Image (cartoon, rainbow, N blue to C red):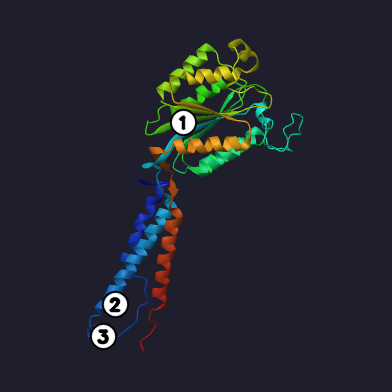
Amino acid sequence: MNYGLATPWALALLPLALLPLLRHGQQTLGYSSLAMLPRDGLSDLVDGLVRVVAMAAVIAMVFGIGGLFRAAESVERIGQGAQTVMLLDSSGSMDTAYATGTANTSRAAVWGTYLSKGQVARRMLAEYAAQRPQDMFALFVFSGNPIPVLSLTEKQSAIQAAIAAGGIERGLASTDLGTGLIRSLEYFKDQPFTGSRVVMLVSDGAASLTIPVQDEIRNLLRKYRVSLYWFYLRAQFSPGLDTKMSSDTASQIAPEQLVHKFFAGTGVPYRAYSAENPNALREAIAEVNKLQNLPIRYQDVIPRRDLSARCFGVALALMAVLLAAKCTELERWH
């Protein structure tokens, strides 16, 4: 472990620790003839210990004044899980209710009187992350523009806060799935490949991908060796991912079918889960929880810790010992 001082100039006060060697600070008693007194080894030992305690107290105070700290360090840990990027659609369509299984599925329902698809999804993803404390999670949201929220970390407090933060306001009108997916895959850039890599896409579709965007997505998925899971939150009047129709018809009324077909042909592990109600979404997330449970190695960053309070605590304890010694001094011969 590496240690340092926030204010190194405080080390100039260290010579003060030599003062107990120069002066004992004890009360002296007169005696007619010191030569008549026998040698008292115990008293000499106590005197030496008191001086050492006084020196240690001064040193502790100096390091406290200097702001002693333990520097941040990286520790390799081994667990069971995956590196998971949660990619959430934050477009306005995610503010609607599920097709079935909710108290109010009307499109005319007043915002705030029901749980939207996005709110339910965030709640379930938070539960999923809480069940996997050894996983590394990142969060990325997209609508008209991609918004990075949290890079890969295993800190549950940060993960839970990031998931909850995005569920406060309503979404925007547009959906740019392609850019959001590309930017989220960049979270794996320069990350050592030490276990499973997963992108959990939570979206209700209604997006199209151009050929150049498809090529870039395919290349990044293969380059970073990512498994892709799409939790498709089917809208009330959507035909879904598996309804047979021509490509031209799908591009007009169900572009998510074309996206699904593209994902299936990327050559990477891919599964789509059609969730038209909260129970279906919960079951889909539970299935992924069973699939992604392989060994993972990751670097845990332990942040810098301020030790000045501990130094002052040690100094206070040593001063209490000196005070106790002072209280036991003899003021006169009995």
The residue drawn where x is 55% and y is 13% is 210
Q: Secondary structure at mark 2?
A: helix
Asked whether the viewer can see residue 150, the reply is: no
The residue drawn where x is 64% and y is 26% is 91
Q: Position of residue 114 (x, y in %)?
A: 71, 37
Q: Nearer the viewer, residue 92 or 183?
A: 92
Q: Secondary structure at mark 1?
A: strand
Q: Nearer the viewer, residue 182 or 128?
A: 128
* Residue bearing the label numbered 2: 43
Left or right: 119, with 229 as reference point: right
Position above or below: 102 against 259? below
Q: Position of residue 195 (x, y in %)?
A: 38, 34
* Residue bearing the label numbered 1: 198
Q: Position of residue 104 (x, y in %)?
A: 73, 35
Which callout, 3 or 2, points to the residue nearer the camera? Answer: 2
* Residue bearing the label numbered 3: 33
The residue drawn where x is 47% and y is 44% is 133
